[in-house]
Amino acid sequence: MSDTPDNLVRRTPWPQSISRAVVTPLQPSVVYASPDPDTLDAQYEGREHGYTYSREGHPNASVLAAKIDALETGAEGGFVTASGMAAVTATMLGLLDTGDHIIGGDQLYGRSLRMLTQDLPRLGITATLADPTDAAAIEAAITPKTRLILVEVVSNPTLRVADMEAIAEIAKRRGLILVVDNTFTTPRAYRAFEHGADVVIHSVTKLLAGHSDAMLGYVCARSPEHRTAIEGTIVTLGLTPSPYDCWMAERGLMSFHLRYDRAEENAAALADHIAGLQGLRQVLYPGRPDHPDHNRAGALLGPRFGNMVSFVLDGGRAEANALSRAMPNMAFAPTLGDIGTTLSHAASSSHRGLTEEGRAKLGISEGFFRVSVGVEDIELLKAEFTRGFAAL
Ligand SMILES: *Cc1c(COP(=O)(O)O)cnc(C)c1O
């Protein structure tokens, strides 16, 4: 330690300890000091591993990315990003050029849809949306300029299941990059790399982190060239995550399997309970035989039908208001994957940008709700929904 009169600035060493911390340290440092210019050269040239400036990577992001890589069988060298949308951005801007065309599922996450239909076109990248439950529609959308297909396995909020096997076959045969947003399904239900994906994306904000207190994304590409391009985009565009969010998400991720399994079990039971309530028009859960894609869901996801349940009330906005007000313990909030059950209403949130006819085409009416089922006691959840429906 320096013995100058004022040694408060950056001079106190971290205490030595023969024992190590069990918890991953939170490292908020933006900059890393290297011993000398030769070492810095070695770092930048990849001969030595060392952090330099946290926009280019930091230990908390590395630890979290390694954990998600381990979950996503076949993933190696994935990147954590500042949000799920940052992961989508890094993929699109990293892999596409002006003049390219891409195909997106017609029920993608709302902001992904907006990126494809409004933002990428400003850069000369055009998109066609097609129904991913119909592989022929996807193939019919291919043009000589098509480079990439972006799909989600289970759609929001109608929980339709994409024909992933056929889409992967088309992507392979036609030489297109297949990007799978695996947020809803998670590696617990679907291992996208094992089914032909070239790039896998997550909103870590949702089920993986699971506590609605960290906003993050993840992207991993199978090919080293794609990885390099995506990494360059993350670093240049500043899509890097904060160390604190990575540290929080790592803690959340430790219980991911337990939360997922419990939430999924609850979702199946809650879907059956809601199916028996007065005032219901339809309940949607891929695990139920009355779901339009039940057979495909069984083949693709096995028994992992997830934690999301949607339902449609008989009636419109008045009934939707009455139901939400009668369930004060259920967070009426536009998110999913929280440890607690949340209720969302597409017409007033995720799909408010569409016209009523546009929503109707997707099967979304004023009575349409989506439930992201959490880990609460199932009897508590059933009682809550019984009370909600009794208010109709
Ligand atoms: C939430 C979500 C995103 C965006 O993730 P953010 O972390 O909110 O930026 C992308 N895709 C899907 C399927 C999502 O649910």
Image (cartoon, rainbow, N blue to C red):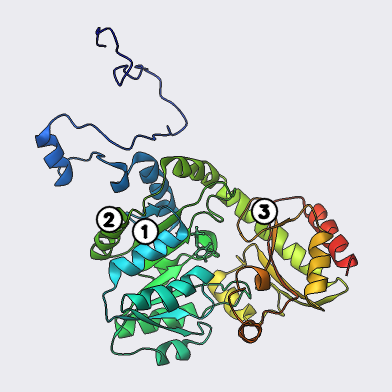
Task: Pick whichever, 291 or 89, lies toward us.
Answer: 89
**How far apart in space, not on screen, are marks 3 and 1 (Cα)?**
26 Å
Choose mark 2 or mark 1, whichever is in front: 2
Residue 236 percent location from the top left of the image:
27, 55
**Callout 2 amino acid:** Thr
Residue 89 percent location from the top left of the image:
38, 64
Instruction: Answer yes or no: disc 3 within 8 Å of ligand 1.
Output: no
For label 1, the crowd category at 10 Å Cα-Cα, with few meaning under 14, some 14 to 19 and many 20 or more, is many
Q: Earlier in the sequence, mark 2 or mark 3?
A: 2
Q: Is residue 74 visible?
A: no
**Callout 1 amino acid:** Ala
Residue 215 percent location from the top left of the image:
50, 51
Q: Is residue 258 visible?
A: yes
Q: Earlier in the sequence, mark 2 or mark 1?
A: 1
Choose mark 2 or mark 3, whichever is in front: 2
**How far apart in space, not on screen, are marks 2 and 1 (Cα)?**
23 Å
**How far apart in space, not on screen, are marks 2 and 3 (Cα)?**
40 Å
Q: Name the residue: 51% across, 87% down.
A: 134
Residue 265 percent location from the top left of the image:
69, 59
Task: Pick whichever, 261 or 341, lies toward us.
Answer: 341
Mark 2 lies on a secondary structure that is helix
Instruction: Answer yes or no: disc 2 within 8 Å of ligand 1.
Output: no
Task: Pick whichever, 261 or 203, lies toward us.
Answer: 203
Q: Which residue was labeled with disc 2?
A: 236
Mark 1 lies on a secondary structure that is loop
**Callout 3 amino acid:** Arg
Q: Which residue was labeled with disc 3?
A: 262
Q: Which residue was labeled with disc 1?
A: 75
Q: Is residue 299 shown above or below 78?
A: below
User: Which quarter of the rendered picture does the N terminus lie within?
Assistant: top left
Q: Is residue 250 left or right of residue 33?
A: right
Q: Name the residue: 62% across, 80% down.
A: 293
